[in-house]
């Protein structure tokens, strides 16, 4: 069974940083692209970026809306996906999801990030 | 960015009825590899979005055949027959042909 479990969310002040983690299990982690998506309360999801699989060199693509502030990485020995978020703003407040692939066939349960003073 | 426009925003339905949701993209979703990467998701209250249909018309694992997707180019439709209580929630279309990936604003399916 495919499982994705995010962690690391919480309350952070504007200008601060946070790193989210996503532990994957039930599939061969290195075979898959992995995505991050966020959803502000009551709004549609917003794709943040993707990191490719082993066959495609683990390179990443980002939404221009977060490029330069957010970085996606992965630890393929522990099957963990990361999202490093810097210079956080109030508008980054959302539920953050990791998802498998670029079709995002499986999603985690999400973790809340609140940016507020 | 590719703009995804969903119609309607809200869709009242009677249980057992049939509904259609429209999704239009601001540019063609045909990829250079020939595939069309248009997908449909359902987000039930308090849950993560779940994939229903991928690449226009392919039902994801475990999705009942009451759900069907169709369309091409920039114009796509999700149809739900014999609506059941478990089908209620917000439906999103999404494209992964072009970076950045984008989602529609959602269609809320609710009981009439």
Image (cartoon, coloured by chain):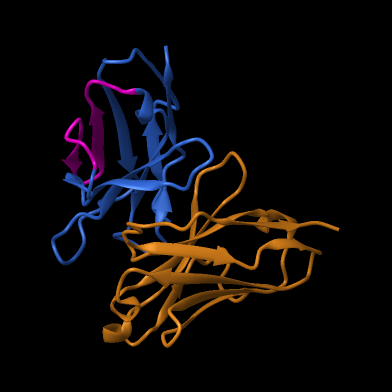
> What residue is rendered at 24% in x and 38% in y?
B76
> What residue is rendered at 37% in x and 47% in y?
B50
Q: Position of residue B30 (x, y in %)?
A: 20, 56
Q: Colour of chain A?
A: orange
Q: Position of residue B27 (x, y in %)?
A: 30, 50
Q: Quadrant of residue B79?
A: top left
Front-most of residues B44 and A17: B44
Q: Is residue A34 left or right of residue A62?
A: left
Q: Position of residue B110 (x, y in %)?
A: 43, 21
Q: Quadrant of the C terminus of chain A?
A: bottom right
Q: Is residue B53 left or right of residue B65?
A: right
**The magenta segment:** B63-84
Q: Is residue B2 left or right of residue A85?
A: left
> What residue is rendered at 43% in x and 46% in y?
B49
- Does the magenta segment cover residue B72? yes
Q: Quadrant of the N terminus of chain A?
A: bottom left
- Does the magenta segment cover residue A36? no
Front-most of residues A36 and A31: A31
Q: Quadrant of residue A6?
A: bottom right
Q: Colour of chain B?
A: blue
Residue B60's place in the image compared with B87, above or below, is: below
Kindly give the residue lying farthest to the right in the view shown.
A117
Q: Position of residue B83 (x, y in %)?
A: 29, 22
């Amino acid at each position: 069974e495919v499982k994705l479990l995010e962690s690391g969310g919480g309350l952070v002040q504007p200008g601060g940083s946070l790193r989210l983690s996503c532990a994957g299990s039930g599939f061969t982690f290195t075979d898959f692209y992995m995505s991050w998506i966020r959803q502000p309360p009551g709004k549609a999801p917003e794709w943040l970026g993707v990191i490719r699989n082993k066959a495609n060199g683990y390179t990443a693509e980002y939404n221009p809306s977060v490029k330069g502030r957010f970085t996606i990485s992965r630890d393929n020995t522990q099957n963990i996906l990361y999202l490093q978020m810097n210079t956080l703003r109030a508008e980054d407040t959302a539920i953050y999801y990791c998802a498998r692939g670029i079709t995002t066939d499986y999603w985690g349960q999400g973790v809340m990030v609140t940016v507020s003073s | 960015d590719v703009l995804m426009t969903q119609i309607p925003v809200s869709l009242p339905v009677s249980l057992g009825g049939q509904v259609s949701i429209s999704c239009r993209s601001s540019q063609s979703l045909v990829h250079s590899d020939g595939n069309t990467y248009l997908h449909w998701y359902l987000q039930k209250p308090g849950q993560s979005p779940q994939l229903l249909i991928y690449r226009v018309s392919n039902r994801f694992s475990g999705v009942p055949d009451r759900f069907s997707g169709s369309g091409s180019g920039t114009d796509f439709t999700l149809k739900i027959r014999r609506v059941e209580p478990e089908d209620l929630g917000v439906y999103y279309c999404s494209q992964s042909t072009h970076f950045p990936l984008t989602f529609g604003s959602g269609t809320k399916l609710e009981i009439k």
